[in-house]
Amino acid sequence: GEESQKPHVTLLSSPGIGQLSRHHHRRTTDAPPAQLQLLNNNPTLPSDLHVIHLPHVDVACGDHVAIRLVHIVRESLRSLPSVLTSLQSCKPPLKALIVDPFCMEALDIAADHSVPTYLFLTASASFLALTIYFPMLHAEVEGDYGKIGERIFVPGCKPLWVDDLLPDVLMPEVLPLCNRIPLVKGIIVNTWEELEPVSLSAFKNHPFFVNLPTPTVHPIGPLTKNEDAGVESELLTWLDKQPRDSVVYVSFGSGGTLSAEQMTELAHGLEQSAKRFLWVARPPKANDASGSFFEAGSDGALTASYLPDGFLERTQGAGLVTVSWAPQVAVLSHPSVCGFVTHCGWNSVMESVVHGVAMVAWPLYAEQKMNARALVEMGVAVRPEVGEEGLVGRKEVERVVRMVVEGEEGKEIRRRVREVQGSAMEALACGGSSSECLNRLGKEWRAG
Ligand code: UDP
């Protein structure tokens, strides 16, 4: 019947940062993006998911990555009207267009086609609140962020620290995106009611958000990718051989890199901790990324020449280093893994929490410092202290790594992350807050 029929919705996604940087390096414009191949060859995705590839466009690089994304998307959107027209003639017809923040300009095109647009944000509700409030804040200080003071008081939310948000979050270039948010039909956000009750309640109850008015916010998380399910990887085979709850996973996301000095400290710290580790160690950022940083080792494996001399030999058996990419969700769900040194990208945070893995919060850019602070407040992460010259020293690395794996000090963090994991499971279970929220969205789309 009507009720059981699946509504037809379309997700419009900008090319991810990962793809963008690869594109930037190699300047290949015609190769289908890696994500598309993943989507096309992924047996875990439903068979009624159809992937449409908007023509890829090359735009001049140079701007901030966020701005570049907006330009790329703007060019790609030229083909959206005809795509929407054909989707509207499908059975059942298209009921909603769901866009990521860099695709907000699709709003006008969708409106021309009378298709409601929903924003999908893979960030915290607290970040969403800041984003909606930002144009007002910008106007108030006349674009001079030095005038804000130490704290930002987003209406109805916990205060934020300006230092956590400069220079990556508070920037005038994102104002056009922020200004459009109130125009969408709804906002889907990867968090859940019980994780962020304060911000989520502000959207519903605080006069500022109510009067804007703020579109309905739908917290349906934690959503984590399942494309790692069933992957085969040397890393997982190695993890199989390690004792339960013994390994620390170290990764700074799809774009994060450390300086050469910082990598050296991290390497020594891991070694001195005498804990097992799995480290996704990208080339340091001070040097230009190129093939010369990788040498074929005697066994044919890649050896990272930017690690301290003898590091790989000395840590052999206890540690594993990969230079490119790990199937992160499979790693975090592995029983041997018990700690995660993370850059605090929101996806990584959600993946860690879902699998009950305690975190070492090591933020690098974007809104990661704000996330790191929230994680420490929540009690699920320890934050290493940054010492002289902005470096986390090896002793400090050793301390925090030991802390998440063993000992009294870290016990509370490990207990607390399991508690939050439990809350996530409840939210996703039948009758839970996120599951109910998703049901309501489904109803809205079937009725719409
Ligand atoms: N990821 C992965 N393997 C890696 C690095 C990253 O699978 O070696 C995935 C990770 O599971 C997450 C995403 O890439 O889903 C990174 O998103 P996040 O928001 O944490 O950080 P960003 O890359 O956007 O900075």
Image (cartoon, rainbow, N blue to C red):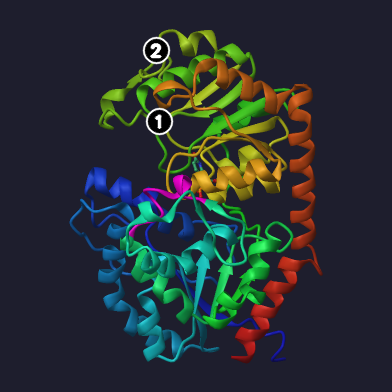
Q: Who comes first in sequence, dot 2 or dot 1?
A: 1
Label 1 Cα neighbours within 10 Å, binned few <14 / some 14-19 / many ≥20: some
Distance from mark 1 CB to nearest ligand 1 atom below 8 Å: no
Horizontal and vertical percent for residue 322? 47, 28
In the image: residue 348, left or right of residue 380: left
Q: Position of residue 108 (x, y in %)?
A: 36, 83
Q: Quadrant of the C terminus?
A: bottom right
Magenta stretch encompasses residue 384: no
Label 2 secondary element: loop
Q: Residues within 10 Å of mark 2 (few under 14, many from 20)?
A: few
- Specify the amino acid type for callout 1: Leu
Q: Residue at x 68, y 32 (%)?
A: 337
Comparing 387 with 445, the one in front is 387
Q: Residue at x 23, y 55 (%)?
A: 29
Name the disc covering residue 258, or none: 1
- Report which residue position mark 2 lands on: 298
Query: Mark 2 and mark 1: span between their CA atoms?
Result: 27 Å
Q: Nearer the viewer, mark 2 or mark 1?
A: 1
Q: Magenta residues?
A: 161-171
Up-down: is 220 above or below 29?
below
Q: Residue furthest left?
A: 60
> What is the three-letter code of the residue carrying label 2?
Ser
Write the residue at 43% across / 23% down: 263
Give the residue drawn at x 38%, y 51%.
17
Kindly indicate whether the residue at mark 1 contacts the one at mark 2 (C-beta within 8 angstroms).
no
Find out if the beta carbon at label 2 lies less than 8 Å from the nearest ligand 1 atom.
no
Q: Quadrant of residue 68?
A: bottom left
Q: Where does the image place residue 289, in percent across and percent down from the top left?
A: 28, 32
Residue 282 percent coordinates (x, y)? 40, 31
